[in-house]
Image (cartoon, helix red, strand yellow):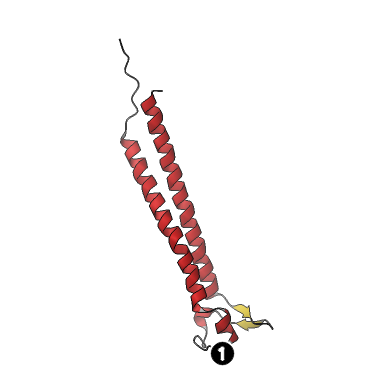
Amino acid sequence: MNPSANIIMDLREKAHATKRIGILLFAVAGLAWLWFAILLLFPYTAGEHGRDCGARIATERLHNESSVCVTSRDWPELLGVLALSLPFAVAGSTFYATGAATARIAGTMPIRPPVPTL
């Protein structure tokens, strides 16, 4: 194989690896969203005595600051989980877009056999 074909094949491999990294970072962001949904939608226990609390989204005492349930799972903690997902989603989209664009560019480059010299 000629040197330019090696360069193109290497470029294609690196592009696909970059896309895989982007998908992995998207998966990490998706796991943070899943953790947020679990914290928001499922009942939990709080306090020293293990008091049963309803789901955060369906509680009647949503803004009652004296409630043990409200203070144990407050909104800043929930939004912090979402904020944690943001850098992973941005990096994942950047890596995936870069890898996809590079793969398309490398796909348009023909791999030509070497020209015989006389």
Residue at point 39%, 54% (across, down)? 93
Residue 110, placed above or below residue 31: above
Q: Amino acid at mark 1?
A: Ser
Residue 55, placed above or below residue 88: below
Residue at point 68%, 82% (across, down)? 48
Residue at point 31%, 13% (across, down)? 117
In the picture as drawn, the residue positioned furthest to the top comes out as 118
User: In the shown orientation, is residue 9 left or right of residue 38?
Assistant: left
Residue 92, quarter of the rendered image: bottom left
In the picture as drawn, the residue positioned furthest to the right comes out as 49
Residue at point 34%, 45% (across, down)? 101
Residue 2 at x, y = what percent? 38, 23
Residue 118, quarter of the rendered image: top left
Residue 111, quarter of the rendered image: top left
Residue 81 at x, y = what percent? 50, 68
User: In the shown orientation, is residue 62 left or right of residue 100?
Assistant: right
State how many labels appear.
Answer: 1
**Split into 4 quadrants, where in the image is the N terminus?**
top left
Residue 36, placed above or below residue 105: below
Residue 104 at x, y = what percent? 33, 41
- Near mark 1 (Cα within 10 A), the count class, few <14, some 14-19 or many ≥20, is few
Q: Which residue is mark 1?
A: 66
Residue 5 at x, y = what percent? 38, 28
Q: Secondary structure at mark 1?
A: loop
